[in-house]
Image: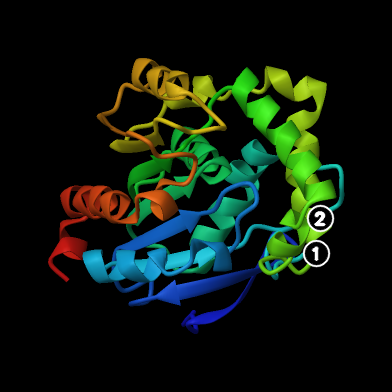
Amino acid sequence: MILAPTGFLAVDGAELEYRLIGPQPSDAPCIVMLHEGLGSVGLWGDFPDRLQQATGASVLVYSRAGYGASSPVSLPRPLDYMQREAREVLPKLLDSIGFREGLLVGHSDGASIAALYAGGHQDHRLRGVVLIAPHVIVEDISVASIADIKTAYETSELRTKLARWHEDVDNAFYGWNGAWLDPKFRAWDITDALAYIRVPVAVIQGMADQYGTARQVEIIRDECYCPVEVTMLPGVGHSPHREAGEATLKIIADFAGATLPAAASA
């Protein structure tokens, strides 16, 4: 299958929008980027393009079902929606693009999905994972900030701003927000998956992250048996690739150079 620069992938009954920058994933190492809980293809901005230029790798970004221009989902989302994404959707997506070797780079929810995939699939094609502002447990700070953003969504211009990036903005917002604010979600915990990761891990965490603390990083360090590189960024919040773009880009490019030598020399 030859992928156009933009289009849709039919995966698990949904049409998922994507962007491909650089070579075909079947022809070169590929970095697959997994967005945050309110993210989409468009919300990555030009970061994927800059990452492709810095590494020479193929870079693929896509919107999960319920986000961007991808198919909507039924609400409420199941509370194990990230586990389902890692177990059921992501393997099919990687196969559909001809993924032959590469990295997963995930942000927030996307980082959790990347960790779940790496721990749940002994995929010989996967050379490493980059976790940007990951969640492995639910913290009080996370729930408080997600409650605050619900108020902002319903009383400010936030809904209008997010609608630029999602065709069904309510589906995107309430699918994510409703799950995280469900009292039963407080028991969500994916630490068990971390011990089964068998590839190098790079963690990028803002020290001023309003959605999670350094506890998330400590758990990853404690539970992983694989090499874990951690970068804590002072004064940076929940989106290091936007707030400290150059530093975040260098961390990922250096990691790609160490784990994907072919990409570094492309």
Identify the residue shown where x is 39% and y is 64%: 47
Identify the residue shown where x is 63% and y is 52%: 89
Quadrant of residue 29 within the rendered picture = bottom left
Front in this rendered view, residue 213 or 37: 213
Label 2's element? helix
Label 1's element? loop
Front in this rendered view, residue 191 or 203: 203
- Classify residue 171 as left or right of residue 135: right
Could you say where residue 211 lies in the image, as x and y percent from the top left? 57, 32
- Classify residue 174 as left or right of residue 102: right
Identify the residue shown where x is 69% and y is 26%: 144
Could you say where residue 184 lies in the image, as x and y percent from the top left? 79, 21
> Mark number for residue 171?
2
Q: What residue type is labelled 1?
A: Asp
Quadrant of residue 42 within the rendered picture = bottom right
Could you say where residue 192 lies in the image, as x and y percent from the top left? 51, 20
Total marks placed: 2
> Mark number for residue 147?
none
Quadrant of residue 132 within the rendered picture = top left
Contact flag, marks 1 and 2 (Cβ < 8 Å): yes
Q: What residue type is labelled 2?
A: Asn
Q: Residues within 10 Å of mark 1 (few under 14, many from 20)?
A: some
- Classify residue 99 as left or right of residue 189: left
Could you say where residue 134 lies in the image, as x and y percent from the top left? 48, 35
Res. 78 in view = no
The quadrant of the picture occupied by the C terminus is bottom left
In the rendered image, which residue does mark 1 sit on?
168
Identify the residue shown where x is 53% and y is 28%: 212
